[in-house]
Every structure is written in structure tokens, then in C-alpha cells.
Amino acid sequence: MEYQFGGPLGALGVTVGTPFIAYALYFVCNENGCPSQSFLSSPLQTLAEQWPGLGGIYSHQVFGYYCAWYFGLAALQFVLPGKTQQGVVLKDKSRLLYKLNVLETSLLVLSYLSFMTFKEGLTWSFWSWMWNNYIQLLTATLVFAFLLACYVYSASFFTGELLADHGNTGNPLYDWFIGRPLNPRIGMLDLKEFSELRPGMILWPILNFTFLAHQYSSSGRITDSMILVNVFQFWYVIDSFINEPAVLTTMDITTDGFGFMLSFGDLCWVPFVYSLQARYLAMYPVDLGFLGIAGVLAVQGFGYWIFRGANGQKNKFRTNPNDPSLRHLKYLETKSGSKLLITGWWGVARHINYLGDWIMAWAWCLPTGFGTPITYFYVVYFAVLLIHRDRRDEAKCMAKYGADWDRYTKAVPSRILPWVY
Ligand code: NDP
């Protein structure tokens, strides 16, 4: 079986490297500077001096709260209303049922926090608690993601559940990382779909708002840049909640196993690394002014137009191909039975949706100004993720469509950036 991510060594590198980056972003970009002068002159010594020890980054109490958050959200999935939908046909011809109510769940949680903030003000102790326990919370998500990956890996040997095609190599480290089980479940709780959209994705705007509240309590004002970053990312999150059914057809759900890569990415990396811009602005306010706001809005609008247009078009094409809005589009018939669009968004580049997402990434970083390159980490990281993801998806499509995929790549030669890449 072919390894991905550089095999066991690559899996080890990502397992150690990504938590290291998450912590480094905190220790390198904080109230002392972003980065501080002392870090620039002697990085290792500064990091060693700042390191608060294990007791400073981990707390049993915070871990307990995080467990309550994870399982509380799981309980809400069952209690709150929501429609039940079938996932894609699996290789054993079965289809799993998913209860879709992340929008209802998030609105309930966020309404409660909004109500309390309205009542108590931006200086409500919850927000300062979140700020003060940031690093303990990060560690709690890391520990939880680690334990979750161990649990689903071990359980997959006993449950007789479906295994992921690439997650059953026999190398324990690699399989644990990439994900051995395809759709691990505890009863009706689908751990992968649940983790993908709920604990981390709902935490992300909560962290952003923590930073907004901190900016207010430390400087007495809220900058336009902080509002834009909060609004853009809040909208991105809510947009994915509104489109929850679309997650059932993504590579993460249909193809990838559930292991440390996804559990860490979903629970820790997304909320803590993606909120870096707002955390920076909490400490270093930036005023954009009218022209700055207009420029950033234009970048965001352009990216969103491509992102939503392309994702919406494909989703409609896969779920309701007779929709009148698709009548003008041309497609290839393939031996697999699935059709491939060759005009419209998917005729411009094979992953034009990634380009839209990446352009939005710029709109999230530009509000931090040009005082430090660190807040542009997301743009660089996301480019690497999308290029790598494009390669993985192409390999999957090549295996599924064979010669028909070659015909498609001739009709649509660009991968992500038209005429360039
Ligand atoms: P995509 O939405 O890009 O879907 C890829 C699949 O679409 C292929 O496997 C194939 O599946 C189908 N497809 C490919 N070409 C065509 C075509 N011409 N016509 C019809 N169907 C086609 O999958 P992703 O899950 O990678 O991305 C979804 C969104 O999520 C993207 O916008 C991406 O930017 C975003 N994303 C964001 C991340 C983040 O961290 N913020 C991380 C990952 C993704 P098949 O033919 O089998 O149906």
C-alpha cells in the first residue's frame, strides 16, 4: 500500500512538528513582541526563558472543562432538532446516517455567550478567563486529540468497522496518524463528522471574540481591523455550518481515515492557529481607515465569490444535476458513472475553489498590517496545505476515473491558478 505524507517518518514529523508550531506561535508572538527583540537576537535562550514548564501549559481543571465542552456538544447534537441525512455509498455498499444540526448547536452556544456579554459587558469574566487560560486550553485540545486518536485506532481492531484504504498498512505509528478506521462511531455519534465541524470550528470564533474583548479591555477600543477579522472568520465558519450536508461528500469524510492528523487538525490546529490574526490584533491594534477597509473587503469579496461559486456549483451538480442553473454547463461522461464538469467554475481550473479559499486567507491576514510577517503564517501554510491536498485529490480521482481523468486534465489543464499552476 502506498504511503502518504512521507510514510511513518513523515507522520512522526507532522505529529511532532505541528503541535510545536502551535506552541511556537504563542511563545514567539505575545505581549513581549511578535517576535520580540530578544527572540530575534537569541531565539533559543528567549524561548527557554519564557517556557513556563509543564505546570504552566497544562491544567487538569482546564482539561476537565474541555472534556465537558466536547461531550456537551455531543449531547446537544442528540437533543437539538436536526434533519437526518445519508452519507455517500461506502465500499461495502452501506450508507451511514448523520444528524445534521451544527447550525442549531452553534447558534445556541453563541446566543448564550452573546446574551451574557450583553448583560455583563465585554469585560465579562469568561472572556478574561479564556485569555488567561489560552495556552492551557491549547494543551487540553492537544491531549484530547491524542487520546481520541489512540481510542479510535485501538477500537478499530475490535469493532469490525470499515477501515480507510490508506490507513491499514500495519505500521502502527502511520496508521494511528493517518487514521485506521474510516467512520469510527460510538453509538450514533460519528466521531469524525462531529469533530470536523463542532468542537474546534465553534471554538474558533469564540477565541476570536476573546481577543476582541481583550483588545477592548486593554486599550478601551475595538479597531476596524479586529472587527473585519472577526466578521470574515465568523462568516466562514457559519457558511460551513449552513452547508453542513456538503461536508458528507468531502475527502475528509468519504476517503480519509480518522486518526491524529484529523483529530489534531480539527480540535487544536484550526481554532488556535487560525485565530492568530485576532490574537495579534488584541495585543497590537491596527487601524485600517476607509481605504484599508475597502481594500480588504474587495479581497474578501473576490475570494468568497470564487469559493462559494465553485463549491456551490459542484455540490448542486452532484446532488441535483437537473437544477436549471446548471443547464448551460458542459460535462464529460465517465466509465465510473459520475460526470465531470468541464465548463463553469470547474472548467477554469481543477481546484478553482482552493484559489478562492486562498484569496480569502489574504483578506484575513492583511488587516494585521505589515508590522510582522508572523501573522501571514496562515497564507503560507494554507498554500502548502492546498497544493498538497490538490495532489492527494488528483491521485484519488486518477484511481477512480482512470483514462477519463486524463481526458479531463486535457480539457482543464490548470490545477489551481488558471494559466499558471
Ligand atoms: P473539493 O470540493 O475540491 O472536491 C474534490 C472532489 O470533487 C473530487 O474528489 C471529485 O470527487 C469532485 N470533482 C473534481 N472535479 C470535478 C468536476 N470537474 N466536476 C464535478 N466534480 C468534480 O474537496 P475538498 O474537500 O478538498 O474541498 C472543499 C472545500 O473545503 C474547498 O473550498 C477547500 O478550499 C476547503 N478546505 C478548507 C480547509 C481549511 O483548513 N480551511 C481544509 C480543506 C479544505 P467525485 O468525482 O468523486 O465526486
Image (cartoon, rainbow, N blue to C red):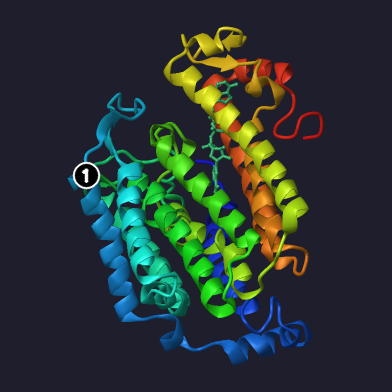
Image coordinates of residue 6 in percent, x first then y, are: 60, 52
207 or 255, nearer to the observer: 207
Q: Is mark 1 within 8 Å of ligand 1?
A: no
**Which one is in front, 123 or 411?**
123
**Residue 172 appears in view:** no
Frontmost residue, 161 versus 41: 41
Left or right of 140 on screen, residue 75: left
Tally the numbered discs.
1
Tell me where residue 366 sits by quadrant: bottom right
Q: Secondary structure at mark 1?
A: loop
Amino acid on which disc 1 is placed: Leu
Q: Which residue appears at 26% of the width and 65% of the height? A: 68
Q: Viewed as shown, does residue 18 lie left or right of 74?
A: right
- Ligand 1: give its quadrant: top right
Give the answer, above or below, for where 170 lies relative to 377. Answer: above
Q: Residues within 10 Å of mark 1 (few under 14, many from 20)?
A: some
Residue lying at 36% horizontally and 41% vertically, measured from the top left: 182
Task: Identify the residue at horizontal 30%, vertical 27% (top origin).
Answer: 92
Q: Position of residue 144 (x, y in %)?
A: 35, 65
Q: Nearer the viewer, residue 231 or 17?
A: 231
Q: Residue at x 56, y 72 (%)?
A: 215
Rendered image quadrant of residue 109: bottom left
Q: Residue furthest right?
A: 420
Horizontal side, residue 289 vs residue 16: left or right:
right
Place of residue 110 in the rendered image (x, y in percent of width and height, measured from the top left): 36, 55
Q: Is residue 95 above or below residue 203?
A: above
The answer to which quarter of the image holds residue 152 is: bottom left
Q: Is residue 158 visible?
A: yes
From the image, which quarter does the C terminus lie in? top right
Where does label 1 land, which residue? 80
Q: Please provide percent x and percent y for residue 341.
A: 60, 16
